[in-house]
Image (spheres, rainbow, N blue to C red):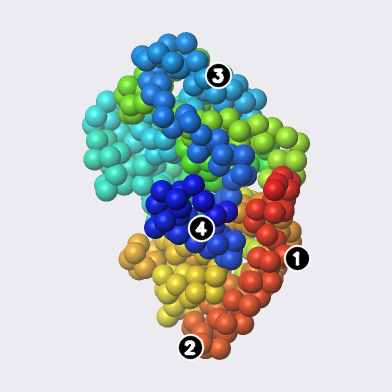
Amino acid sequence: MDYETVRGADPAVADALSAEVTRQQDTLAMIASENHVSPAVMEAQGSALTNKYAEGYPGERYYAGCEQADVVEELAVERAKQLWGAEHINVQPHSGTQANMGVYLAVLDPGDKILSLDLTHGGHLSHGHPANFAGQFYEVEKYEVDQETGYVDYEGLADAAAEFDPDMIVSGYSAYPREVEWDRVQTVADDVDAYHLSDIAHITGLVAAGVHASPVGVADFVTGSTHKTIRAGRGGIVMCNEEHADAIDAAVFPGAQGGPAMHNIAGKAVGFSEALDDSFVDYAETVVENARTLADVFQERGLTLVSGGTDTHLVLADLRPSHPDLTGGTAEDHIADANIVLNANTVPGETRSPFDPSGIRAGTAALTTRGMGTAAIRKVGHLIVDVVDAAANERTDEVIPEVRAAVADLTDEHHLYETRGAFAVQ
Ligand code: DSN
């Protein structure tokens, strides 16, 4: 990808865009919230719809000239309904956080109470962190995972709900490797007469493929992002029953947003269509199988995993027991130096700063898109631990060049835009 047209207009940006493609080709993307979309999704996102204002919804726009915007949005909605089975889906949120904002605005008043998982236990900023609007507009209390097991402490959640009497309980997490028991959260929400928002941003694709239980039809609201385990480009969605449809639509626009990013909605439509292909189920199953393999290798090599494994696309390692003097941030830097890109992450019972926490989080969605199976993932797992061990033993100068060479073999074998797994595009 040379970005020739951009280069003619703006060589500096073209250089950065080309270098980014090279970076993605030459590194292993293991940030659990990242993936690689198909060229078809990218082309749709780069389409003329970026020029169009289309405030409103199909058939009810505030501006003229929205015929094609309507076609694209209706396709996105129809395909999303097939993927997740919700009665009503709004595909306009610019991101998962904007989707959550839409839900809060739809049914909460400022000052209402939200009960959500602690950020250091796997929650998300938009579930009520003080630095986010949700923590500033609403009164927020936290529940936790059981620090022994790493699983959501559903009894603790029930106790916290009985004491706090929330208006909304948020389930669905950003750094939680286990299957969420939506019914158990719903029971608690019913007991305290609270709304239940299930934020499946990380597992949207796993839920669509049926490899993780679905909260649709259980929780009042389900939000997701469209660029993590589903490869439909950057954005968000909100799902609900017809009962809440008008409130959600009004909360997303004009409540939280102005004009929808129609080019991104086109990307969603294309990505959803790709995910409706039978091959997507194979993809999602392989993502989870690969994450389990990564978890096995990490444990064989002595790392301690939060919850002892995974049911999803991600693993979360607590470095403190095996490498007490190595922070997640230092590990992340050295691993990145070896061309494997993952992120430092807080862990339950965190004793360090969120800016340099004690864990590392790694996901398999992007590597699976590159066509990697368990044999390749085993190699990757060993390479990561080679670097972690080297960082703890001050042997990085010797080990990182070896790991970089092994990563280059893997990235050459699993080329990004020539053999994209199921799509085999270009
Ligand atoms: N930043 C995303 C993640 O990495 O989990 C969530 O928004």
Residue 184 % position (x, y): 54, 36
Residue 215 located left or right of residue 220? right
- Specify the quadrant of the image occupied by residue 338: bottom right
Tag 2, which secondary structure? Answer: loop
Cα distance in 3D space between marks 2 and 1: 29 Å
Q: Amino acid at mark 2?
A: Glu
**Which mark lies nearer to you, 1 or 4?**
4
Tag 4, which secondary structure? Answer: helix
Residue 261 in the image: above or below residue 359:
above
Cα distance in 3D space between marks 3 and 1: 43 Å
Cα distance in 3D space between marks 1 and 4: 30 Å
For disc 4, the marked residue is 18
- Evaluate if marks 3 and 4 touch, with contact meaning CB atoms under 8 Å apart: no
10 Å crowding of disc 4: few (<14), some (14-19), many (20+): some
10 Å crowding of disc 2: few (<14), some (14-19), many (20+): few
Residue 237 in the image: above or below residue 284:
above
Residue drawn at point x = 54 percent, y = 55 percent: 2
The circle on residue 394 is: 2
Q: Nearer the viewer, residue 281 or 360?
A: 281
Residue 426 % position (x, y): 69, 48
Q: Quadrant of the N terminus?
A: bottom right
Q: Earlier in the sequence, mark 3 or mark 4?
A: 4
For disc 3, the marked residue is 71
**Which mark lies nearer to you, 3 or 4?**
4
Q: Amino acid at mark 4?
A: Ser
For disc 1, the marked residue is 375
- Evaluate if marks 2 and 3 touch, with contact meaning CB atoms under 8 Å apart: no
Residue 24 in the image: above or below residue 197:
below
Cα distance in 3D space between marks 2 and 4: 34 Å
